[in-house]
Every structure is written in C-alpha cells, then in structure tokens.
Image (cartoon, rainbow, N blue to C red):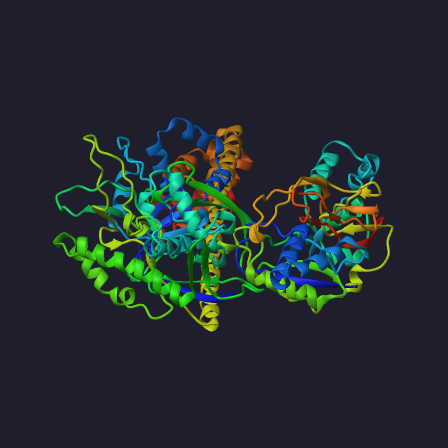
Amino acid sequence: MALYRYHIRPLSAFATPLRSDTLYGHLLCAAAERGGSAAVAGLIERFAGDQPPFRLSSAFPSGMLPMPVLPGIARPEFRRQFAGGQGGAVLFAALEAYKQFRKRPYLPVRLWEECGGRLSQAALFGHYQQEPAAFAYQAGVAADEPHNSIDRATHSVLREGGLYFSRATFYGPDVHLDLYVETGERELFEELFDHLGKTGYGADRTTGKGHFVWMRDESFDAASLAGSGSHCLSLSVLSATSLDQVAGYYKPFVKQGKVWSGFGESRPFKKPFVAFEEGAVFSRLPAVGYLLRDIHSDPAVIQVTWPLTIPLTLEGC
Amino acid sequence: MEAKAIRLDVITPVHIGTGDFLDPMGYLIKDGDGGPCLHLIDIAGWVEDHPDPEALADLFAKSPLPALRRYLYEHLDPAVYGISRARVLSTEVSGEYQAKLGDQRSENQLQLSPGLRSGMKQTLVIPGSSVKGAIRTAVIDFLDREFRLNLKGAAQPREYREKLEGALGRIREDAFKHLKVGDFEAARDSSLIVTAKETSRKPEKQGTPKPPCEVVASRCLGEADHSRLYGRVRIGAAVGDGANNRLTIAQGQIRAGWNWDELAHLVSNFYLERYRRERENFYRQAHFHRTAEALARVEADLLEPRPGEMVLRVGHYSHVECMTVTANAPRTRKTKDGKIMPFGTTRTLANGIFPFGWVKLVPCGEEEFRQGIRAKEEHDAAAERQRLELRRTVLEQREAQLREKQERHQQELKKRESEARRKAELEAMPAEERQLFLLEKGELSDNEVFDLFGQLDSLEAGLKQRAANAIKGLWQTQGRWSKKECSKKQWEKVEKLKAILGE
C-alpha cells in the first residue's frame, strides 16, 4: 500500500469535523449510493479483515501533523535543560512557556522530517522555544449561526424554540487541509472522495455546508514519513474491538457516533465507545479488529476505526 | 445530481437578522468618505489597550450609560478597533445617533438589528437555509393546491405538521434533502444601514416603530457592484438507480418532480403573484408613490424572469403573504372584542421606500462564477489590507505622538533639574561672586552692571580683575569701549577699567 497526501480546499463552512472515522462512514455511504448495498457490503467485509482497502487520517491544517502524545519531561531534567538548573523566576518562566507549548495541537511536518521521526517531549519543546512561529497554522474559525424556524400555521417565526443555533467551522479563502491516505486502490478511494466533495460532508449539507474540492499532492514524498521506529504515531481516531493489546501514550475520549438518515435509518445515535484521539503514540496495537459492530440497534450499522500510523522513535533529535 | 453555479441578484434590500440587537457600546457612527459610516467595534480590545485601566474602570463603574457611549465615541478610534463597517444611508439614523448619544435624559437605546454575518464575522451572508426555506414555501403551496392537502383544515399544529410530513416526508427522509443550497456571501464592508418604517394602507395610521437594520447592498439602493452574490445549488439524487437532476416528491398519492428550470418557474410564479398583489394593495396608493417609483426601475427584472431564473423573497420583513400558502390564511390572535386580528395591513419599507427581501437566483456559467468569487475575494483582501494599513498608520502616529510627548516631558524634567541645580549653585555663592557669575553669563541688566561697576573698588583683587574683564567684554559687544563710541562719562568708566586691567 502506498501513502498519499491530499489537499482539501473547503468551499463552504463545515458543520462536522473532518475526522477519520467520520470520513470512513461517509465514504461507505458514498459507496452505497453509487453501487448499492452489495457494493458497500463487500467493502465493509474488507475493513473487517486485515487488509482494508484504504486507511485514512483525519484532516489537519496544511503542513501540520497532530502533536504526538509523549511522556512528559521529568522535573529535574526540565530544570536542568530549560531553566539552567535554577529555580524561582527563571524556572517559572520556563514552565509558563512549557504550558503554552503543551497546548499546541499540531506539529509542523517540516520539523518531523528534520527529526527523521525521532522525537522526545524535551526536543520538541526545545524546537518550540527556538521557533515558536513554526507551530502556527491557518485554521478555520468555529462560530454559531442563528436560525429561525417558520411556524407554517401562523406563517411567522415559531415563538418557542424557533431561534436555534448551529455550530460550524468557517474557512478563509486561502485555508487548506491535508489528508493522508494509505491505499493500494487509489482510484477507488478517489472516486468515493470525489463523490463526497460534490455531495457534501457532514451535517447541514442541504444548506450548503461541507463542500470542498481536493487534489492529490504530487510533490509529497511518502518516504519522508516512512521508515521504522520503536513506536507509531496515529493520525486517526482509533478504536478496536479489543483494546487489551494497546500500549503507548494516548488521550482517550468517548465517541458518540451518528448514523446518516439517507438510507432510511430513523435512529441516529450509535452506542458510545472508547476511542483514542489523533496524535496517540503506540508501542503495540492489535493487527485487526478495527471494524466495530454491535454499536447500534441495527446490526448492519458499523464504525470503521482503522488507524493510519507513521513510525516514530522516542528519543531526542 | 446537477450542480449549478448561481448568481443571486439582490434587487431590494435584504435583512437577515440574528435575533440579537446592537447598541452603541458595540458600534460607532462617524462621518467618513461618502457619508456617515457605522463601525462595529472591538470594545474588549480597546479596553485591554487602554493606558489607564483604573480610570477606565472607575468611569465604567460610576458613569451612566449615555455618558459611556459619548466617551466611547470620543475616544475609541474605529481605524484601530473597528471590525467592519457599513454605510449609513439614512440621515435619520445618523442624526438620531448624534442627537441622543450622550443625552442623559434619553431612554432611546439606539439599538439596531445587525445582519447575519459569516463565521469569519466580517461579511454579511444570505444563508442557504433562508433561500431553501423560501423555495419550500412555494412548493408547499403548490402541493396544497394541486393535491388538496387541506392545510387549512388542520386545526392543531401537530395535525398541520403531519399533513406536511405526509406530503414531503418525515424529517429524516424529507424530499428536500435532494436540494442543497449553499450560502451567498456579500463583499466585505458593503452592507448598509437603513431604517425599517412600517406604513399602513391607511395613511393616517401610525406604524409600529422598528429598529434600523443592516441590509445586504441591493440594486434598488444603487449598489450594483455589491448586489451580486455567488453560491452553488445542487438538485437531484446523486448516483445509483435514483440518480437524476430533479427535486422529487413521492409520498403516498403525491407524485411530483421538477428540474431546476421547472422549480424556478414554480417558485417565481408563487412570489410574483404576491408581488403583483402587494403592488395593487399598497403601492398604487398615493402615499406609497415613492415606493412605486423605486420599484418601477427594477420591475422588469422581477416580473420577467428568463427560463431558469428564480424570483423569491427572503429575510426579515418579507411579510406574511410571502410565507403563506394560497388556500390558508395565517392564524392570528384575537382582539379584545373577540374578532380575528387582521393581517397584511401594513408594509415595512427600507428607508420608508424600498420593500425588503426581493432577490433573483440566476444560473451562471462556471467562468462568471469563478470571476465573481475571485472579485469578491480580491475586494475583501484589499479591504483588509486597507484596514490594516490604516490601523498601522494610526498606531504609528499615536506612538510618534506618545514618544514626542515623552521626550518633551523628559526635556522638561531635565530643564527643571538643571534650573534647580543652578539655583542651588547660585544660592551657595557669595553675593559678589553670584553677580559676577551672572555678568559673565550675560544675564545682568544694564542697571545691575552699573551697580557692580560701582562696587569694583570694594571687591578683592581677583574678583576685581574678573569683574573688570567681564564688564569690558560686555561694553565691547555693546560698542561702548572705544573713545569715539563713548560719551565723556562712559570714557571715564572705560579708563578706570583699563587701569584695573593694566592696559
């Protein structure tokens, strides 16, 4: 399977974040729309096996990767390296800067490439201190949109509950997102992805949200993210039927997925499940089990949580 | 599924409200090029940058609201803290603002209704949901008439909703999911502030006061350049067996479907029928003559849409007829005497002249669409650059003034210190030496020099020499040293000095 990078240019606001598991669901729905239930059933079974047709990352601001979840810097080491062994005001200032660094959600791809995928929290913080601007990125702006409902009985605004708000992320004209895809069937992925761009992604598509154009990044050198390592960095939302074998550093969260109504499903809510956020660093992962079943009263409803990972070695650089 | 690039022509002012109001703690109106301008302000940023936060906090704590509004107007520079601006087209709005801003007695809150902005907060937007809702109204009307939905017979809201679901489907399978309408975004800083005047069919009747509002630029208000917005519409099912380019209704006995041109025709008929009725009921009357004249200039565009062009009405003040199906009057409340309240007896007009909300969706080619989007983006980028440049200039001027003020202050301080030191030095000197010091500095008057001359004989030798030398220097510069320049008495004095100096 080869690794590709795609640039996404939003043409409208997005009501749903571009996360890998949601993307998988959209692409499967696209397959169902295009090829019917038999086509999508075949795809689903491939995700259930050990050779998925494609693995997706979540979408990140252009030129960025998710900040790896790394073990913290030991206090004596922090004091020695970043406060010159001193305490008091010097140590305080360094800790303040470290606190700011830990809030950074993304890591520049350029830095990853320079380090050759060999990272430690201390090394990254050192880079941040030297060049904080490198960690800046162009992002969308999340905002609430007010809406009115028209009461068709009175033909005026609904008095109670008529005003409601929907949240969306708005992008400026120059903002792009990166999506990584590992696949041996690029044409299949691109066909489904193209369909998604035209029909829209996420909530409120029918009022214009979620439309985008995309292009494959021909200048991307997959070798820059390849190699070997002691760990792997997940670029995706990850979960599995059994998490016993998972070892590493991660941020868990409870995912509450939804089912699209496009095929007549009237109960939108999936059962919640534990997942790991993008940026998790694993030393061990299960080989299979990334298709979750039994997450809805309809047994046909599934969730794909295949991670796209890149090798990482935990040390300084 | 068919994707269409659409140009939305804003023919009359469109106001999409936010459910919120702006007050003068959130905006300023100041005169600029082209007339008064309303500036949305970043008051939090201004407070943060204020050089005297304690004084400001004191002011906010102790001052009544009108005084605070006046203070903001006088001290907040919109070039630095303005977020966006809108031209104020109504002198009534700008005049009232100026008159009542600091009026301690005024109960006028000077509120206005802002337009809906995109998430980036800088441009007005006509959301796809508004356009889609307007299309839906026309389709519901068609279904009610053609398929006898009998919406009029629905006594309860639940019954009404069930009839609609019976026609269009429940929310999860609604037929309108195959019509996707995107947002239409206006150019930056192109919005306008107008009054919203309610005028009755009966000229003697007073209208209900309404706050001024922010509208998208329109052809009616002469803003042709910024009255064209671009967006996309997608109609039909995407792929598979149901792939088509139609909005299809297939619920129960109801079978209907339209491609874009057919849908445009249906929707335009619905709204144009209401336009004509409104014109007959209101704008033929004498006291609406200005409205009639204004509409006459744009009526050809409205009344004669070409195939594929869709006329509709969106936003606030579209009036109940444009949201009402033909066979069903809106439910209004009862008056005190039990009668049903009448509806549709007034019109709310922008600046008392222009009806709100008329737009036309025009399919355009990809090239025009791209050019339109690019022109808007370039305009917005230029507006942002201009704003940043102006901000930078104002901040630099401010810093220069501050530096100058600080330098003057430092110089003043130095001067005072220097004077204080000198005063102390002088006070420490004996009187004769002080006189001599001042003489050497040229700071003694003629009388004081004369007095010192008179004291020469009482000075000790060193001081006498110094004084004689200093007086000589002074008289030389004054031209009172050579014999031919002097009077007899002056010459006697000169000779005395020469004797002291050994000349």
Residue B451 at what x, y percent from top left? Answer: 40, 34
Depth order, front residue of B161/B19: B161
Residue drawn at x 43%, y 66% as measured from the top left:
B259
Residue A9 at what x, y percent from top left? Answer: 59, 61
Question: Taking B259 as reference, is B288 left or right?
Answer: left
Quarter containing the N terminus of chain A: bottom right
Instruction: Pick out the residue farthest to the top.
Output: B62
Question: Taking B284 as reference, is A210 left or right?
Answer: right
Residue drawn at x 37%, y 34% as measured from the top left:
B68
Q: Quadrant of residue B186?
A: bottom left
Is residue A233 visible from the viewing direction of this image? yes
Depth order, front residue of B211/B415: B211
Depth order, front residue of A38/B393: A38
Up/down of B59 relative to B342, above or below: above
Instruction: Pick out the residue farthest to the front.
Output: B253
Q: How many labels sit on residues?
A: 0
Residue drawn at x 65%, y 60% as measured from the top left:
A31
Depth order, front residue of B484/B172: B172
Up/down of B81 relative to A228, above or below: above
Residue B160 at what x, y percent from top left? Answer: 38, 43
Residue B422 at what x, y percent from top left? Answer: 51, 35
Is residue B499 visible from the viewing direction of this image? no
